[in-house]
Each structure stands twice: as C-alpha cells, then as structure tokens.
Amino acid sequence: MKIKRFEAAGFREALALVKKELGEEAVILSSEEIPGRSPRVEVLAALDPDGAADAKGFRMEGLESGEPPEPKDRVSLSETLCRYRKTGEDLSLRTLVEEVKRLREDLDHLKGRGYRLRLPENKQRLYDALKEQAIQEDLALELSEQAERPQDLVPLLARDIRGGWNWSERKIILLIGPTGVGKTTTAAKLCGQAVKRRKKAGLISLDTFRIGAIEQIRIYANLLGVPLVIAASAEEVRRGIERMPDRDLIFIDTTGRNPRDPAYLRDLQAVFALGIPLETHLLIGGNLSASFMAEAWSHYRELPVDRIGFTKMDEAGGFGPLYNFLRLARMPVAYVTHGQQVPNDIAFYSGEELAERILNRETIQVVPAESTMH
C-alpha cells in the first residue's frame, strides 16, 4: 500500500495530482481545507495495488466535479492490511516483509506529520493495551478491530499460535540459532525433561568452534547420566546417531555463528544432506531486537526449520515480540526458556497459554507436565 499527502490550491487540483501519481484506483482517505493568507486543500490518498477498490474511503471515480466528498465512515487501515495479507500469500515471504516494512514507514511518516489513528473509544483501549505489550502497530490495529471485548483477544492471538509437545514420539532434534541464544543450555534442559519423563535420551555436540563448549555439555551429560558424542563433522553426527540405537530422543547441539555467514549455513546444510529424519528447532532469543529477529529469520528460513524455541525470556521486556515474530515466521512454538537452571527453566505452552502470557506479561511459570503432554 502506498499512502501520500497532496496539497493544492483547490480540491479539483488536488484530485488531479492524486490521479496523475496514483491513478484511477486511488482511495481518498481524508480531505481538509486549510485557511490562511493562501488557503489550500490537503488530501490524504492511498493506493493498494491488490484491492484498492474495496477499501473504506472515497474512490476517485465520481469526484471529477471538484467538490469534496460527503463525510463517510472512518477508514479502516487494518482491514486493508488483512486484505493485503490474503492477496499476498502467493508472494515470496521476503517480498511481503518488504511491503509491510514500507507500510510501517508510511504510517510512521504520517504520525510524524501530525496524523493519528482514530478509533472508537473501546477499540482505542484495546489498541493501547496491545501496544503496551510491544505488539507492533499494524498487528495491534488488526486485533483491536477484530475484538469487541478484552476477553476476545486471547482466542484471536491463539488462532495464530501453535504450541505443545508430544513426548510419545521418538525423534532426533537439531537445535540451530544465532550466537548466544543458549543452544547448549536448551539441549541440556530438553534432555533433562526427557529423563524426568523416563525417556532414553542422548546428546550430540557439533559445537567444537566455541571455547569451553565441549566441557560445558560434557558436564551436563554427566549430571543427567546420558551418553554424549562430540562430532566434528556431519559424517560424525551420523556415526554418533548409529551409536545410540536405543534412544527415544537425541538432541544435537550446533555451533552458534552469524546467520549472515554463508559458510555456516553450508555446514548446517551438510547435516541435512545426511538424509536422516530430523526435527529442526530454530532458537530465537526473546531479548533480541525485532529487527535482528526478522533478519535472522530471513536467513534461517532457507533451512528446513520445523519449530521455534524462544530462549532467555527472563532477560526480555515482555512476550509481545514473540507474537510479532510468530506472525512473520508462521511456525509452531516448541518451548520457551527463562533461566539457567537445568532442567527446570523451560515451559511447553499451548497456543492459548502463550497468548495469555503475551497479553498479561505474567511472571513465567513452568507449565505442569499434565497440561502439556499428549
């Protein structure tokens, strides 16, 4: 969507400018006469190439008379956003992210020029509450328009969140993610949770790059009483898996490096090329900036990621950014970690439970096993 303000001596001239730059499908969002020594007209217009004809505004058609349109209902920007997301499903994710980024920049520009979103009082309260939880502006607007009451928000958010964990499945889990997100500690927590549930677990470490990493995971393996294999290559990962034929769950810890590094991604691709069935968990630090989360996803999405694990939530300002990221990545959540204690500082939330924490900013508590096991 492209939003732009036009100024002219009269409404007819302003419409001509809109038509020339945005075309016949432009929507007039608002118009205002500015008095003064040199009176002028300001027109706020928008163009959505995928559906401008349906937007709530004033179409260019029928406005050739030069008279300002009669007042109508307030324009719904979030409705336009919803429609854009639907028509944009066939676009690549990268293209969609860029378009949403440009839309946010347009909104910021409008706010900087003194324009404000005006909502009915009850909607404004919902919108403000969502913004307080660090939910980004376009998503907060969309949710506040869809909800009638505060209690409507949890199911609305839960609709976009898939969570839970099935401990009955036998699988090999590969943990990947940027430097410092806590992959080794998370691998140990998962291994410990498996042991608590009387599952046979094993650890494999590909993290031979970081000083002290091997000693750290060796300590965890000894404390948990599980076998550990140190692998320096993808082929050694295969041999390590073959040495654990009786394990219910095998957790593979990998080196954390800059996701912009092509060599790092090639090393990970070598593991996938083994042809071994893997469930890949991308770990994202809840304490990271929104821009870093989005950039990391733009690189890791090239890999066969299955689930997202959010870490270091004890260092985060709230849960709202998790919802922002999940709307971008469209991936299920495996777990949320919130401290250094192994194996306890980890929670396996359902979509509704995570939605409640996003909205309420409650202190994280470990969810009882009965509520998370299938």
Image (cartoon, helix red, strand yellow):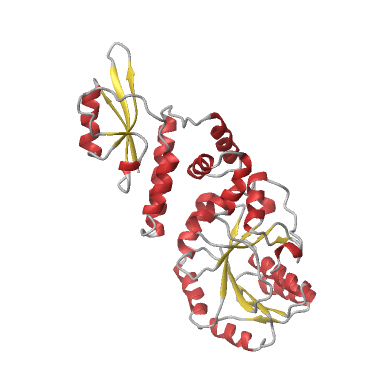
User: In the image, is residue 56 above or below residue 372?
Assistant: above
Give the percent coordinates (x, y) of residue 51. 32, 46
Residue drawn at 48 percent across, 43 percent down: 138
Residue drawn at 66 percent across, 88 percent down: 245
Give the percent coordinates (x, y) of residue 326. 54, 56
Q: Is residue 309 left or right of residue 57?
A: right
Residues 42 and 51: in front is 51
Q: Quadrant of residue 46?
A: top left
Residue drawn at 22 percent across, 35 percent down: 19
Residues 101 and 131: in front is 131
Q: Quadrant of the N terminus?
A: top left
Q: Quadrant of residue 73?
A: top left
Give the percent coordinates (x, y) of residue 187. 67, 70
Give the percent coordinates (x, y) of residue 367. 74, 59
Residue that sits furthest to the top in the current view: 37
Residue drawn at 59 percent across, 47 percent down: 320
User: In the image, is residue 191 above or below residue 353?
Assistant: below
Q: Quadrant of the C terminus?
A: bottom right
Q: Is residue 11 left or right of residue 319?
A: left
User: In the image, is residue 357 above or below residue 273?
Assistant: above
Q: Is residue 216 left or right of residue 44?
A: right
Q: Is residue 304 left or right of residue 373?
A: left
Residues 118 and 183: in front is 118
